[in-house]
Image (tube, rainbow, N blue to C red):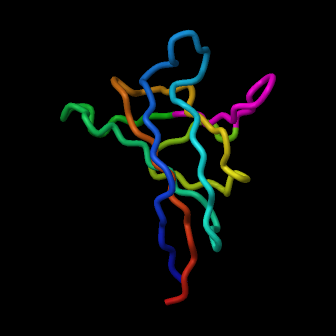
Amino acid sequence: MSSVYEFMVMVLSERQPLHGQKHRSSQNFTFKPPAGCTGLLWTIKDEFAEEEDVNRTIHVDIYQDKSGKDPIIVKDLTDNQQTAILGAGEHLYVANPKGANQSFTVNVYAKIETEN
């Protein structure tokens, strides 16, 4: 068996929490894992990094926007990290960025196992 990765969503995150927010650095995003999805691949890219910052590691948390206290869904996520499927993938946002000098993107891909 091998794996293919299907792009689901891209979200832009600021390098620090949004004005007036304690943790949130992006708007909400939602994705729907396709049939056959066995996990998620997350990429975190600073598309405009200066040459000396290309190898900088950005760490983020993923929260779910809910009434009351927002739960942390994934903590300390980094580029090319895989996670389990996060339920329905609804009302999520990027939070607590560390290591970023400017805005960056977070992409989510569905991991799908295929037979060769």
Q: Residue furthest toward the right?
A: 68
Identify the image quadrant of the N terminus: bottom right
Q: Nearer the viewer, residue 20 or 44?
A: 20
Question: For the point 37% across and 28% down, which residue is it?
Answer: 103
- Count every numbered label the image shows and give the total: 0
* Figure check: 80 above or below 110: above
Q: Quadrant of residue 47?
A: top left
Q: Quadrant of residue 70?
A: top right
Q: Position of residue 79 (x, y in %)?
A: 45, 46
Question: For the point 49% across and 42% down, which residue is it?
Answer: 78
Q: Nearer the viewer, residue 113 or 64?
A: 64
Q: Nearer the viewer, residue 42 or 28?
A: 28
Please indicate whether residue 28 sits to the left or right of residue 70 in the image.
Answer: left
Instruction: Give the magenta-colored segment's residue range.
Output: 60-72
Question: For the point 61% across and 15% down, which residue is it?
Answer: 22
Q: Is residue 57 magenta?
A: no
Q: Is residue 63 magenta?
A: yes
* Figure check: 17 above or below 58: above
Question: For the point 57% across and 28% down, which residue is it?
Answer: 95
Q: Position of residue 114 (x, y in %)?
A: 54, 82
